[in-house]
Image (cartoon, rainbow, N blue to C red):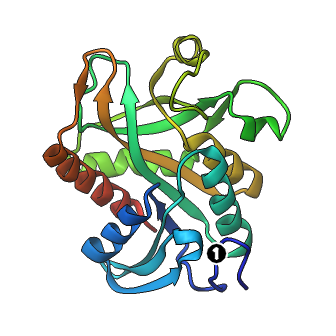
Amino acid sequence: MATPHINGNIGDFAKTVLMPGDPKRAAYIANNFLQNVKLISEVRGILAFTGEYKGKKVSVMASGMGNASIGIYSYELFNFFGVENIIRVGTCGVINKDYNVGDISVAVNSVSRSNYLNMFNGDTYQLPASEKLVKLAEKTAKDLNAVAHFGNTYSTDTFYGDVYQTEVMQKYDCFGVEMETAALYKNAINANKNAIAILTVSDNITTKVEMSSADRERSLNQMITFALEMAE
């Protein structure tokens, strides 16, 4: 049965959904990494596909930008379409000088002051990724011999002008900052489902190094493969 934001049906989505922010990136993943691909939904330009990766049924759906947007789509996937696992695939900026642009970083916890979370009462939250998926990410890193960092991220509602960013990141030892993971983790916890964010470092705020367009494509492909290998 369709929801206000997804025009699919029960059974259209796999148990595991990869969730990039950009609809074009969702299409890129579907067209370049999956076989037997079917377009499931395109409401408001947010694309969702289901296909196969190494014989496993996998879905990919864009989230849009920000906690409020991913909050809507992840809520509906978990609660109305039988999705068990959502793996966010995206980018983050880091402050740790030991992190290199292009490195894979896993958000073990998401720290946030997001207004999305305030709807559930509270102020600053530290929300964990699913332990099951963290362990699976650790195993995948070993299996792929991939450089992967594990730690806390700060999930902000504002790309510009977050006056709390430095204070909160230092207090909670956050390696980087992004804009979607907190709402995803909150929805997973509330629905008793599983979520994790696998992120590529796009820029280092401390060293001022930014990812080139060529590096961006290569590094994002590594992240996508990493996430697909985790799909159950």
Name the residue at 70% across, 66% down.
Answer: 76
Quarter residue 186 falls in? top right
* Of the pair 120 and 159, the residue shown nearer to us: 159
Where in the figure is residue 192, as x and y percent of width and height? 72, 56
Quarter residue 205 falls in? top left
Name the residue at 61% across, 35% down.
Answer: 157
| Residue 141 vertical position relative to residue 48 in the rendered view, above or below | above
Q: Give the side of residue 94 with respect to residue 211, left or right.
A: right
* Of the pair 136 and 163, the residue shown nearer to us: 163
Q: Give the side of residue 135 with respect to residue 102, left or right.
A: right
Q: Give the side of residue 23 with respect to residue 69, left or right.
A: left
Residue situated furthest left in the rendering: 214
Where in the figure is residue 189, as x and y percent of width and height? 71, 49
SS at badge 1: loop
Residue corresponding to mark 1: 6
Residue situated furthest right in the rendering: 121
Count of numbered circles in the view: 1
Name the residue at 61% across, 38% down.
Answer: 128
Name the residue at 36% across, 71% down.
Answer: 27
Where in the figure is residue 65, as x and y percent of width and height? 53, 49
Where in the figure is residue 180, as x and y percent of width and height? 56, 44
Q: Give the side of residue 158 with respect to residue 174, left or right.
A: right
> Label 1 crowding class (10 Å Cα cut-off): few <14, some 14-19, many 20+?
many
Amino acid, disc 1: Ile
